[in-house]
Amino acid sequence: MTPESLKKEISRGEDSRRQFKADVRNAESLASEMAAFANTNGGIILIGVADDGSVPGLSQQDVGRINQLVSNAASQLVRSALTVETENVMFGDGRVVIALSVPKGLDKPYFDKNGVIWLKAGADKRRVNSKEELRRLFQLTNQFHADELPTRAGIDKLDKLRFRDFLRDVYKQEYPESTEELTKLLQNMNLAGEDQNLNLAGVLLFAEKPEWIVPQFVVKAIRYPGNEVHVSEYLDTEDFSGPLEKIFEDALAFIMRNLHKLQAGRGVNAPGIPEIPETVFEELLVNALVHRDYLVSAPIRLFIFDNRIEIISPGHLPDNLTVEKIRIGNSNIRNPILVSFVAKGLLPYHGLGSGITRALEVWPDIEFTDDHEGCLFTAMIHRKPVQDLEFAGELQKTPVKTPVKTPVKTPELILNALKGNPHLTLGEVAETVGKSLSAVERAGAKLVKAGKLKYVGPQKGGHWEVIE
């Protein structure tokens, strides 16, 4: 480092990557500063520079003493030991400044002599004083993942129909007949812990009522008039809960019903083309649900304005990911259990890192914001003004009522399919009638409750009976 580059560093002032110290005499205090840098993103400590940016400098005697103190602090007073670098920079008039570089740690978390974990907070440091912060620190080093979190939900909270159909459709396996077999299977699938309760992934994917167990992990959607958030005015609002598959389908439907539709030369009875392709929101919603930070107890928020749509996820980008990197397809698995199950077809997932690039290919006017301080990641999809939409003259402002025959409803489709083949699984029924599995499950449960449908015989080898 030259005197000129040192002056530039000093002119920038103190921040989370840069700190000034006129002198250092307490090795334990210096060790905690180095641990804080190593636990965050690394940084540089300029010794011989006062807090106000003046440079009293160090004498040659001070330089020898401080370099020895740095070596002792890094090797003996930080756990695990740190490898740091020092550089003596001449600043004129015989003054010396020591530039102490602390790298981003590879063996986080780092403790001081007293077992305290420190993190940088702007130009200062602070203790890690909550379980959530400690979990997040372990998550950053792939020693722990949020979707592994234990819950108090026993396996009796499992949605048996949903999980049974998943086993049949994906693994060609029948639902276990005993509680012991079911528990062992869930543990082997990383959906339950040693305490025999469902973990967070198990709850989010297959619990009957996830919102009763983890009420914070929902999606809150609002359609505002105009382009600003209103305290009390809105055009449409809804909260979406349930397993991730249901949340995804309902949130996607909310967006699509609040988009403009273009007839684009199609017949008056034909469904309109949405102003923004549906696949854009498929990719971004899946990204939000699968890659959000589940250590942050907050919902995903979905805001629709006249000029944009915002999908706001708790948690900033992990590790060294940046907006620029994700735009070209780089990614990082924050919730590996969720990713592994979603990739098996629970959601329209096309591979790690491909969702953002696929959305951008279809609709380039998407802006991403990574807010580290607010711990939020926002995808902002810009809408075109109505007058600029292609075929704007044929814009559907209200749904077109069709004089043709009313479509057959899902319950009737299910009953007709099971009359034809009572041995179908619900997954096979969904494929037969052209509806989503969750829609068939909801309609099927209502039919059973209404006494119009029942399952006869054992889980393996039984059949459905339609009750006229």
Image (cartoon, helix red, strand yellow):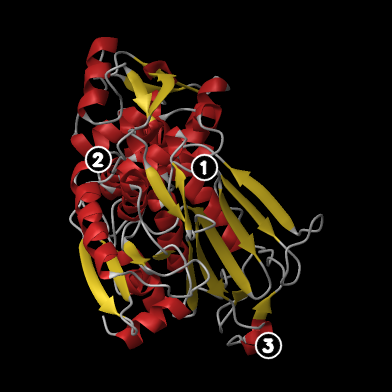
Residue 241 visible here: yes
Disc number at residue 87?
A: none
Inter-mark Cα distance, 2 to 3:
52 Å
Mark 1 residue crowding within 10 angstroms, few (<14) / some (14–19) / many (20+) = some
Question: At label 3, which amino acid type do we have?
Answer: Gln
Up-down relation of residue 442 to residue 196 (above or below): below
**Identity of the residue drawn at 25% across and 42% down:** 77
Residue 330 or residue 250, whichever sits in front:
330
Residue 460 or residue 320, whichever sits in front:
320
**Identity of the residue drawn at 55% across and 44% down:** 298
Task: Please state the horizontal and vertical placement of residue 321, each as a whole percent of the image.
Answer: 33, 64
- Quadrant that contains the N terminus: bottom left
Up-down relation of residue 71 to residue 462 (above or below): below
Mark 3 sits on what residue?
Answer: 387
Secondary element at tag 3 = helix
Secondary element at tag 2 = loop
Residue 46 or residue 128, whichever sits in front:
46
Up-down relation of residue 322 to residue 405 (above or below): below
Question: At label 1, which amino acid type do we have?
Answer: Thr
Please tell me whether mark 3 or mark 1 is closer to you in this view. 3
Question: At label 2, which amino acid type do we have?
Answer: Gln
Task: Please state the horizontal and vertical placement of residue 254, each as a whole percent of the image.
Answer: 60, 56
**Identity of the residue drawn at 33% across and 77% down:** 95
Q: Is residue 93 left or right of residue 390?
A: left
Disc number at residue 410?
A: 1
Please tell me whether mark 1 or mark 2 is closer to you in this view. 2
Mark 2 sits on what residue?
Answer: 143
Identify the image quadrant of residue 235.
bottom right
Mark 1 vs 2, N-terminal side: 2
Inter-mark Cα distance, 1 to 2:
45 Å
